[in-house]
Image: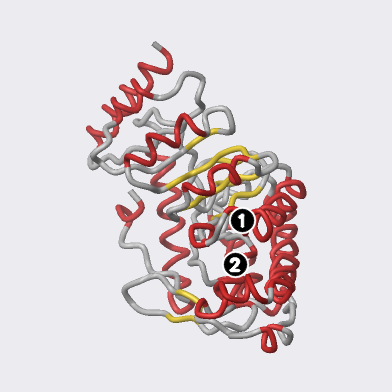
């Protein structure tokens, strides 16, 4: 659906004009689709980004190509270098430029249009981009305070950015991934947890995500890591409203009953797991968002009809 309006430009600075034009066209297409598709999608302005935006703001170089997403290159390798990390002035970073571009998109369309939140990861995930992975995990064990100090600086910049974003554009928005509606709260990705133990999750990740959840009222989580060993920890996140796991079908089938009493679920599965299976095998009282792929208008209408028949009878 995203590329029907034209191939989405890669999120590189030299393509910003094309990205903005694409976002406006996508917004109008979503509005027109509301007339014929009875789903729950809400039109939004898609200021999409890569994962590099916070790491770049701390000084990381970014690897960019013409055929893939950009990614940050590590800036530091040890605690001595980490000690020199400074919190940048927000107005001097690419993050502030994203705020200005979000304003521009609303000016071009609707001053009240919902915006898609830019790519937000946990502060610890961003720290793992700034710090070379070859020494990052070792430092978590041998020099945890150095890791936590960089992490606190990342969290300070993140909070400053988010406070301005929500003040400028309102508390409701579309999550960066997947694209569900949030009336308030924060959504973020948490992927480094696949490489650490539950004890390290409890020490390094849970306190920071709980602090963010308490600050903004609730949390939505995306995780595409192989992290079944962290499910207990994820279920302990304060005010967790929705979780999205991207995993093989066998794992997703186990996730639905596991999180049935914890929060809403919006998992991704492969085409081998059909929608009718999900409709007939979801746990009783589970709150679930189904987001199956459709390859044509006819298929999309048929899928919505099937789901709505179960929902409304």
Q: Earlier in the sequence, mark 2 or mark 1?
A: 2
250 is higher (above) or lower (below) than 304: below
The reply to whether residue 97 is in sight is no
| Residue 104 figure quarter | bottom right
| Residue 190 figure quarter | bottom right
Q: Residue 179 location in percent, x, y?
A: 48, 46
Left/right placement of residue 215 relative to residue 209 reads right
Element at label 2? helix
The reply to whether residue 221 is in sight is yes
Instruction: Please name the residue shown 46% across and 71% down the image.
Output: 17
Q: Residue 141 location in percent, x, y?
A: 63, 71
Q: Nearer the viewer, residue 107 or 143?
A: 143
Q: Nearer the viewer, residue 152 or 53?
A: 152
262 is higher (above) or lower (below) than 96: above
Instruction: Please name the residue shown 69% across and 71% down the image.
Output: 144
Q: Nearer the viewer, residue 147 or 158?
A: 147
Element at label 1? helix
Instruction: Please name the residue shown 25% across and 36% down the image.
Output: 297
313 is higher (above) or lower (below) than 305: above
- Identify the residue under disc 1: 201
Left/right placement of residue 232 relative to residue 22 reads right
- Identify the residue under disc 2: 98
Mark 2 burial class by Cα count in 10 Å: few <14, some 14-19, many 20+: some
* Residue furthest top in the image: 313
Left/right placement of residue 15 relative to residue 200 reads left
Q: Which quadrant of the rendered structure holds the C terminus?
A: top left
Q: Nearer the viewer, residue 59 or 179?
A: 59
């Amino acid at each position: 659906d995203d590329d029907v309006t034209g191939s989405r430009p890669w999120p590189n600075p030299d393509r910003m004009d094309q990205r903005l034009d694409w976002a406006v066209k996508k917004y109008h297409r979503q509005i027109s689709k509301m007339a014929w598709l009875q789903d729950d999608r809400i039109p939004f302005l898609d200021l999409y980004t890569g994962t590099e935006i916070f790491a770049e703001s701390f000084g990381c170089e970014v690897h960019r190509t013409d055929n893939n997403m950009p990614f940050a290159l590590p800036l530091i390798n040890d605690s001595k270098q980490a000690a020199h990390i400074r919190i940048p002035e927000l107005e001097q970073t690419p993050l502030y430029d994203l705020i200005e571009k979000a304003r521009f998109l609303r000016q071009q369309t609707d001053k009240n249009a919902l915006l898609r939140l830019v790519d937000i990861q946990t502060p610890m995930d961003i720290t793992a981009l700034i710090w070379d992975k070859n020494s990052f995990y070792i430092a978590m064990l041998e020099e945890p305070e150095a890791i936590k100090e960089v992490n606190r600086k990342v969290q300070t910049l993140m909070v400053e950015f988010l406070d301005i974003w929500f003040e400028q554009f309102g508390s409701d928005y579309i999550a960066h991934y997947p694209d569900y509606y949030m009336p308030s709260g924060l959504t973020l990705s948490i992927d480094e947890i696949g490489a650490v133990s539950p004890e390290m999750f409890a020490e390094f990740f849970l306190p920071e995500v709980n602090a963010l959840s308490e600050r903004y009222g609730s949390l939505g989580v995306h995780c595409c890591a192989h992290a079944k060993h962290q499910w207990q920890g994820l279920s302990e996140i304060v005010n967790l409203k929705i979780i999205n796991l991207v995993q093989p079908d066998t794992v997703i089938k186990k996730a639905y009953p596991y999180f049935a009493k914890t929060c809403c679920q919006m998992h991704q599965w492969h085409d081998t797991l059909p929608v009718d299976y999900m409709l007939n095998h979801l746990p009783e009282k589970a709150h679930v968002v189904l987001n199956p792929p459709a390859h044509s208008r006819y298929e999309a209408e048929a899928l919505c009809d099937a789901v709505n028949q179960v929902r409304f009878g």
